[in-house]
Image (cartoon, rainbow, N blue to C red):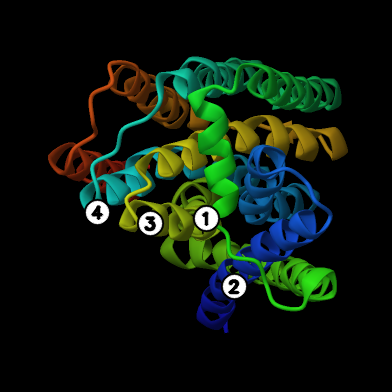
Amino acid sequence: MVTFCLIAGLVLLFVGGEALVRGAVGAARALSVSPLLIGLTVVAMATSAPELVVSLGAALDDKPAIAVGNVVGSNIANILLILGVAAVISPLRCHPSLVYRDGMMMVAGMVIVTALGFYGVIEHWHGAIMVAMLVVFIVYTFWSEQREHSGSAKIHADEAEEVPSPPGGVTGALVLLAAGLAMLLVGAEMLIYGATETARGLGVSEAVIGLSLVAVGTSLPELASVTVAAWRGHAEVAVGNVIGSNIFNVFGILGLTSSVVPVPIGAEFIAVDVWVMLGSSILLLPLMLSGARICRVEGAVFLGGYVAYIGWLYTFV
């Protein structure tokens, strides 16, 4: 039963996440929302929906280790696992303007999570400030890219173009959107139950399960979209998707979750995990700013680093 819940939860999160993204983007297109705004908001929020549903559900179920582990682990997986896979498929290069603004916002989010880890809890007012920072960042980004027509504006617009519209116009999009949300809600409950029981069965903490199994499961929509973008040779879209997802994970998911219920951050996260998250984010910036590609060999190194991190989790934690 536990294995069934775990697998079914992961499948529902993946399928539901894909349906939610296609439905949300299709509805936005039908309402004549600009591709830039769709890429900035709809795609980023929809691809992060599995993390939001799982983290909020875990926090409300008094399982904060899964809620925090999901976000921290997803951010680590986004860079080391997902960008690693994408770089192995097709070498990655990113427009510097995207990294200067979005990349620095991503690193700022990691620094905030690290600082709050030492504080010990993300309280209501912390969450409210984080959500407000996200809103201001989106508004500023949309305004500046409309005004300057920078290279990053094209990347955000291309993120929206990567998502195919569902058939049936607005009606079809709304049906797909509702179906995706329903699958996410059911899948999140099944995954949280399966993850908790799996942790007990393996004799590991809920934090370890959240950082690994749950994090990878909720990152499946990002993995799918980034892999497709890399396969099509749209490397900049892949990088932009990961950076945007990491920003939403911190400011949107942890911000919204802690706005509803305070989220304690266990001391186990401060020992290594937040530093891996922060370090991998900082490592990404000079590679992107230099204009150098993340080649296949470096992608393989990223993947090796992720495997080593997961091995460490299950060996020493």
What amino acid type should be assigned to the residue bearing mark 1? Glu
What amino acid type should be assigned to the residue bearing mark 2? Val
What amino acid type should be assigned to the residue bearing mark 4? Ile
Q: Is residue 21 above or below residue 254?
A: below
Residue 146: percent from left, percent from top: 68, 24
Q: At 80% from the left edge and 51% from the top edge, which residue is drawn?
A: 32
Residue 166: percent from left, percent from top: 67, 72
Distance from Cα at disc 3 to Cα at disc 2: 16 Å
> Which residue has dot 4 on it?
89
Which is more N-terminal, label 4 or label 3? Answer: 4
> Which residue has dot 2 on it?
15
Distance from Cα at disc 1 to Cα at disc 2: 17 Å
Q: Please report contact status of discs 1 and 2: CB closer than 8 Å, yes or no.
A: no
Q: Please report contact status of discs 3 and 2: CB closer than 8 Å, yes or no.
A: no
Q: Considering depth in this image, is 140 or 282 the residue closer to the camera?
A: 140
Where on the picture, by quarter, is residue 68?
A: top right
Regarding residue 188, the answer to whether it shows in the image is no
Distance from Cα at disc 3 to Cα at disc 1: 11 Å
- Mark 2 residue crowding within 10 angstroms, few (<14) / some (14–19) / many (20+): some
Distance from Cα at disc 3 to Cα at disc 4: 8 Å
Q: Please report contact status of discs 3 and 4: CB closer than 8 Å, yes or no.
A: yes
Residue 256: percent from left, percent from top: 79, 37
What amino acid type should be assigned to the residue bearing mark 3? Thr
Q: Please report contact status of discs 3 and 1: CB closer than 8 Å, yes or no.
A: no
